[in-house]
Image (spheres, coloured by chain):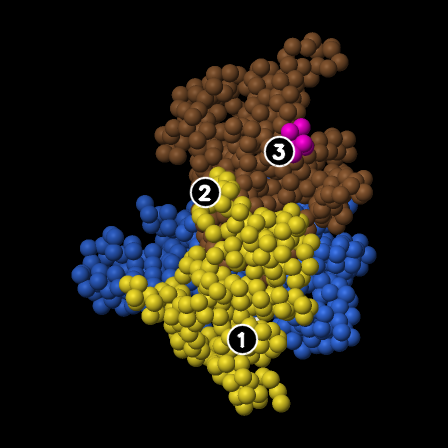
Amino acid sequence: MITRLLQIAATTLWLLVALSYQTTIAAPANASTSELRQHINALATGKIKDKPRRIEALAQLGSNKAIAALNALIEGRLYSDKASTQVFMKHGDHFVDPLSLTAVNTTSKLKKVKANNKVRRIARAAIARLTLKSPNSEQRLQAVEVMFKAADHKLLPLIDEALEFEKEQEVKQKLLEIRAAITLQNKHASKEAQLEAIGQLRQMGSQQALGKLQAFINNSGASAAALKAADLAIKAIEKSQAIWGVFQNIWYGLSLGSVLLLAAIGLAITFGVMGIINMAHGEMVMLGAYTTFVVQEVIRTSFPGLFEYSLLIALPLAFLVAGAVGFAMERSIIRFLYGRPLETLLATWGVSLVLQQAIRSIFGPTNKEVGNPEWMSGAFELGGLMLTYNRLWILAFSLIVFAGILLVLNRSHFGLQMRAVTQNRRMAASMGIKTPWVDAFTFALGSGIAGIAGVALSQIANVSPNLGQSYIIDSFMVVVFGGVGNLWGTLVGAMSLGVANKFLEPYAGAVLAKILTLVVIILFIQKKPRGLFAQKGRAVEA
Amino acid sequence: MSKFLENTPLLYLDGVSVAFDGFKAINNLSLVVEHGEMRAIIGPNGAGKTTMMDIITGKTRPDHGTVLFEGQDLTLHDEAQIANMGIGRKFQKPTVFENHSIYDNLLLALKGSRNVFQALFSTQSTEQKQRIDEILAVIRLENRRDTLAADLSHGQKQWLEIGMLLAQDPKLLLVDEPVAGMTDAETVETAKLLREISKTRSVVVVEHDMSFIRDLDVKVTCLAEGAVLSEGSLNHVSSDPKVIESYLGR
Amino acid sequence: MISQALFTRFSLGARVLIISLCVVAILVPAANLLLPPEHFAHVPSHLLPLWGKYLCYAMLALALDLVWGYCGILSLGHGAFFALGGYACGMYLMRQIGPRGVYADPVLPDFMVFLNWQELPWFWQGFDQFWFAMLMVVAVPGLLAFVFGWFAFRSRVTGVYLSIITQALTYALLLAFFRNDMGFGGNNGLTDFKDILGFSLQADTTRASLFAASALLLALVFVVCQFIVSSKLGKLMQAVNHAESRVRFTGYRVEHIKLFAFVVSAMIAGIAGALYVPQVGIINPGEFAPANSIEVVIWTAVGGRGTLLGPIIGALLVNGGKSYFTAAFPEVWLFALGALFVAVTLFLPHGLMGLFKQICTRFNKRSATAAKVTPLMKPEAAE
Ligand SMILES: Nc1ncnc2c1ncn2[C@@H]1O[C@H](COP(=O)(O)OP(=O)(O)OP(=O)(O)O)[C@@H](O)[C@H]1O
Ligand SMILES: [Mg+2]
């Protein structure tokens, strides 16, 4: 029963592979379509004992376009039209052409093409040969992987055949592994063969290998030595999987951390360097995201060719928009509130309400669609890790922004003035620094960075008027946790919070993980009220 | 036991060091203040005078060294406990309860229960009122008793703070630069007041004003770079070449 | 004797407030129940819960003022204590529904039946008793405030740091209460209440009684607060606000003073929440939203913090304005609220009470005692 199911699974998967061939690869040059069609149509003719020959002939053409038809033959889905001698495949409740795979409307009576076990076996062998001979190693690999899932001892001769001429190391390895899996399924295999197979599966180390080994232990009366080896192999695989799992979690954590970092860097400047609690910081992020949206809208309607560059165009604009709003805020409100941090908190909260409502009035309360450019979409595998491009870019981008800010603060003339003003306002003023302007530009810088963060966030978060609200508490946590007035603290804070969150998630679930991190930070602040990288000195104690 | 107490000095600092980010603000400092003694402490800016008071009052924890008050280890207690053990402190910058009247400032400082619930239900006894009136007379603010402390002049605030310390009735009074920003007349008055106070308790005064120190006429300790540079009578200290070098100048 | 001692502590404004609250507690229900609907002074039934809600908000603002105005602790998480009190009351009301729920389970509230729960979780036990629920209304917020404050004040977390972690606290609770498996009705919260102490919540008499109870309890809480702030402890609280280290070097335990204020304040907030829930008929996790807590701050600031009258006036005015604006110009409300935050902090740092005092002083300039407005922020000397 199970083998029957596996067979079905295998054949459908083969079909899928075959389909993907047909869309991606041009047929091999040596078989013309008409020739193929001729041979396929021939499958319906003649006696049953002629069929193996016909199948061989079809396979000889070496075109994987024949796979679909062969598959249909095996599954009894191949029908022929007596009148025209045309062959069709039954697909659900309609018929399709075996080559173009397009639906056809036939009114004439169709007859099922007969097959017996021998025919089926030969057809299957042909399919395997055809697939495994695909010139594209990627496709071969895919085919082999499909085979692995439905490893069946009937495939053994095919595999051996494929092994003979397979050159690609990776595919060869996979084939050997299938062989191993099949060997384990075979109760009559010798002990040595079993041990060798176990070793190969162990090397493979995948979830599938794990499954095969488990199955081996569960349902065979194999020798104690083989069982022990299988058990050890399972342990080893589980261990290596756990290690990859850790790396995957670290990656997710860093990715979350990079988002937090982006949202928090600007805050680290306004809060950490200037001592201003900007509750409207989240709204600056939101403005950046909406700027991206507007840029993409304009591009979509007027310059469709520029879409790939939309983010690059949005970056400076978002910086300017958010920076300008921040500048205006500092000049009109915050400068009257220096030295009154709690009041600043309230006033900026008021500004955040106004900004949210303004955006809601202009753009409406619903989510806005911001597209991902090509280079931001997709994913790739690295060892046992799955990495998506947008997350990778955002991580890289956050580090670039971080380094940029560090450079501005520590190396530029403006940074020097800024530090001077924060350390001793009056002294700086008497040295000829225009402190009000330094304040305004520092605040604008912090806000501008938030705008840039908004561009990045528009790629992974919903762009709505509430966008900022969902990040503000987290970013405050990052700054407070990392230690106020220390950008490195912000970096470490963001990354460790991100990683901690993602490590808790598998055990506690996303929401509980978040609650736990909040609670941990609340407790942490009790222990180190000034954060991880605390600023020391008398000034901060006042 | 009482014999033992008599023999132990009131305040005993030995080998005390504290560093901020590697900078040694106090470096192997030793100091002994006897019962009933008044001590003046001088030294250049940044010598560690205020930091020394921070250590005694529990605001800063020393890295090394012994700090004993009546034989009790102060490093094991926090500010409130140390205050209740009998150490009062005047800050370099006058610190009073600006939003309370002068009377209330003294009332809050007055010796008595420090328990929160007792404070909730407490009422003033006539004794307490009398004591506050006495202190008001001492600090010359009798007829300003209902004025908000915020409205006082700088010098008056200094005095109010000293008055609050008196109300606390401490065994040891630490006074950080009490005459900074005062007129000469006020300075003389303050010196008189401190001498008066020192009749009943020990006092440690930090000051830069040499004429004020001279008025006090007590043993002087000169600190520099976190350690004792010289100790003795004012004449002895001020003629010490090391002191002249680092503090008084030639 | 004691009552006389109490009364001498009250200013004219305070006496006016107490008396008018008592009068309102009698007149408004009477105007609703006794006067015929066509009478010009008749109070329509739908206004009772609305006004009752304002009174609850006023009580919440008063609670916040006790910590912020007097002790200088800006809590951005007072909504959490309010909501916890509300949930405690809501749990009582849920248990009162009994078999009248949609699923007609005699014990389990509907949402538990829906989640396939077999029995009442342990923390729902006892809430069928009114006295127990009312105890929890103050005990739960009080305990949370105690634990939180114990850690925070002992390690001297102050100023904006404290504000930020109180915000994190209410945010964490928001997330927690959204979860279904917390056992508090998840997203939907607790609602569909039927009756309280055997009286139908839909009945006019019950609504009128709840309104009267709100007014009287507000008056009572006001008296208690007045007692606290005018005691020596109250003076210490204000002293902590302005010169924390001086209080400490005088020998008081600053953390105990703050803890006392914080816990009492949280309990008052819990009572306010408990009165709020039967009048609005629902409690859900939205009440934990950080934005709600910040809004309470603005009520207090508008009225004038550091006075007990101010927060009550502020809460009534702002919420009255909110009801008007959200009905008349819904788009404008958030603009108005945002502008209010900015304007009050910039131009009215002492709120309406401060403005009122200023005007009074200007009128009495010639008279000898000029009531000074206390400075709100005095940077504390560290040494
Ligand atoms: N919390 C602290 N963090 C870092 N450095 C500190 C701290 N407290 C004191 N210092 C440093 O320790 C040194 C001693 O300071 P202290 O205030 O004790 O000097 P002082 O003798 O009181 O000077 P002055 O006469 O100016 O009052 C100074 O250099 C000061 O900068
Ligand atoms: Mg000093």
Residue A54 visible (yes or no): no
User: Residue type at mark 2?
Assistant: Gln
Classify mark 3: residues with Cα within 10 Å, few (<14), some (14-19) or many (20+): some
**Residue shown at 37% from the left, 65% from the top:** B70
Measure how far apart labels 2 and 3 are at the Cα level.
Answer: 21 Å
Q: Are marks 1 and 2 in contact (CB under 8 Å)?
A: no
Q: Is residue C45 magenta?
A: no
**Residue shown at 67% from the left, 78% from the top:** A411
Please report, as a chain letter, where disc 3 is located: C
Q: Is residue A327 left or right of residue B89?
A: right
The chain assigned the colour blue in the figure is A
> Could you confirm whether marks 1 and 2 are on the same chain?
yes
Q: Mark 1 — residue? A: B217
Q: Colour of chain B?
A: yellow
**Splitting the image into 4 quarters, where does residue C295 fall?**
top right
Q: Is mark 2 within 8 Å of ligand 1?
A: no
**Splitting the image into 4 quarters, where does residue A209 fall?**
bottom left
Figure label count: 3
Q: Mark 3 — residue? A: C10
Q: Colour of chain C?
A: brown
Q: Nearer the viewer, mark 1 or mark 2?
A: 1
Judging depth in this view, the residue of C286 and A81 nearest the camera is C286
